[in-house]
Image (spheres, rainbow, N blue to C red):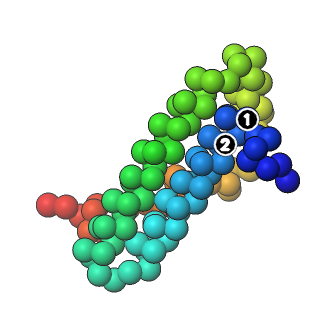
Amino acid sequence: MATKKNQTPVGQMIQRCHKWRQKRKQYIDQARQTSDEIERERLLQAAEHYCRIANEEQIKIDSLRDPKDKNAAVEEITENTENSDSGDTSEEEEIGFPDFITNLK
């Protein structure tokens, strides 16, 4: 395991992104389990905050990567998508919105 002293700035950015995504998932899971609508909304807003932070950091990471690395990553993702089973779902597809958000009138 590499120490922070030996890591590249991009590696540190990736770790932060991962940490924020985990935090977002934690808040979404908590929101699913709570019955209080106000607390659920607060948790979902916190999750959205971490999502924005992670997306901004991902944009920075992508801008720092070498174009060759980007092309290789895109090809790898394309190959993995073509080879994956249709039963696999991404994290975004699993989340969904609670009733109080989807039933706004």
Please say if 101 is above or below 3: below
Q: What element does badge 2 sit on?
A: helix
Which residue is at a point 66% across and 48% down the rendered structure image? 15
The amino acid beneath tag 1 is Thr
Instruction: State the separation of the CA atoms marked 2 and 1.
Output: 6 Å
Q: Position of residue 22 (x, y in %)?
A: 58, 60
Where is residue 27? Give x, y as percent: 46, 67
| Quarter of the view holding residue 89 | bottom right
Foreground pick, 81 / 10: 10
Question: Which residue is situated farthest in the top direction here?
Answer: 67
The crowd level at tag 1 (other Cα within 10 Å; few <14, some 14-19, many 20+) is: few
Q: Residue furthest front?
A: 5
Residue drawn at point x = 24 percent, y = 64 percent: 103
* Residue depicted at 60% across the width and 31% down the height: 61
Q: Which residue in the structure is indicated by mark 1?
A: 8
Determine crowd level at label 2: few under 14, some 14-19, many 20+ residues with C-alpha closer than 10 A: few
User: Residue at 70% across / 27% down in the picture?
Assistant: 74
> Residue 51 location, x and y as percent?
46, 49
Where does the image place residue 11, in percent across and percent down from the top left? 71, 39
* Residue topped by disc 2: 12
66 sits to left or right of 58: right
Q: Are marks 2 and 1 in contact (CB under 8 Å)?
A: yes
Give the residue furthest to the bottom: 35
If the image is split into quadrants, where does the C terminus sit?
Answer: bottom left
The part of the image, by quadrant, that contains residue 60 is top right
Amino acid on which the number 2 mark rests in the picture: Gln
Give the answer, above or below, for where 61 lies relative to 83.
above
Residue 26 visible in the shown view: yes
